[in-house]
Amino acid sequence: MVMEEEEPVVGIRQEGDEPKPKRRRTDAHPSPSRWKSPGEQRSYSSKLLESIRHVTRQAPPLARSAPPRSRAVREAADRVLAVAAKGRTRGSRAILSSCRALKLRKMRRVVSPGCRRPRKPPPPPPTGVAEKKVPAMGRKVRVLRRLVPGCRRLPLPSLLEETSDYIAALQMQVRAMSTLTEILSSLGGGGSAPQGGLGGPSSSAASSQQNL
């Protein structure tokens, strides 16, 4: 007598088959104190220096002798700051996405020059419509949502978390750029960064690096 093999019943959980938990995407906010650590400060300062060098090398030959433009330095500093956050915050993801969008716009501008259409002027506001009065607290929250990248539609508790982390990151950015400015001023170059990084052969540069 041939025994027929039992087929597994569909819909019944077999032994050992445990359901796998679904991964939920959570915005893990890094603690603002991580931006105050000496290791994070040194890492950001070194990457910022390399990014500024890259901006200087990409400049036209006639403009390489002059210091990089403030806008290019600012974009490089924000980009390095967003990379250091590793996309854990909405602000860092918004900065990285805006950098990619800016790069795509530059590429399209090079590929198809002279194809830009004139922009239409915005329509005038309707007359006779009374503006809604927003409370003072609401106006401040609205301004805060515009200042912190990627937080225009964020609820207030999450907005405050993002703001505290963003402020700590900006403070680290200011410390790094101030120290870098002191190093360049002490070397007398102004537009050329030290070849040995922030810890170059110069004694003044080495002493300034200890303040990071």
Image: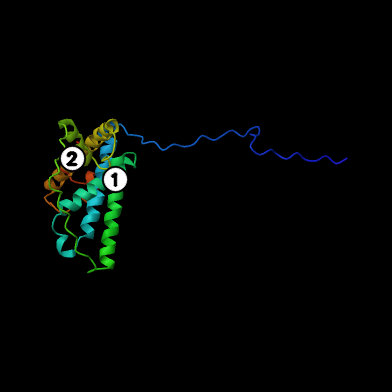
Which-is-in-front pick, marks 1 and 2? 1
Locate residue 23 relative to residue 89 in the image: left or right.
right
The quarter of the picture where the C terminus appears is: top left
Check the image and name the residue furthest to the front.
128
Q: Residues within 10 Å of mark 2 (few under 14, many from 20)?
A: few
The tag on residue 30 is none
| Identity, as a three-letter code, of the amino acid under mark 1 | Ala
Report x, y in % for residue 143: 18, 38
Which picture quadrant has residue 129?
A: top left
What residue did someone put label 2 on?
A: 174
Q: Earlier in the sequence, mark 1 or mark 2?
A: 1
Q: Residues within 10 Å of mark 1 (few under 14, many from 20)?
A: some
Q: Is residue 38 above or below residue 180?
A: above
| Identity, as a three-letter code, of the amino acid under mark 2 | Val
The quarter of the picture where the N terminus appears is: top right
State the SS at label 1: helix
Which picture quadrant has residue 62?
A: bottom left
Observer-nearest of 81 and 158: 158
Q: Is residue 146 visible?
A: yes
Q: Residue at x 26, y 66 (%)?
A: 110
Locate residue 174 relative to residue 32 in the image: left or right.
left
Q: Residue at x 27, y 59 (%)?
A: 105
Report x, y in % for residue 209: 21, 40
Which picture quadrant has residue 167?
A: top left
Observer-nearest of 177 and 150: 150
Report x, y in % for residue 88: 34, 39
The tag on residue 94 is 1
State the SS at label 2: helix
Report x, y in % for residue 18: 59, 33
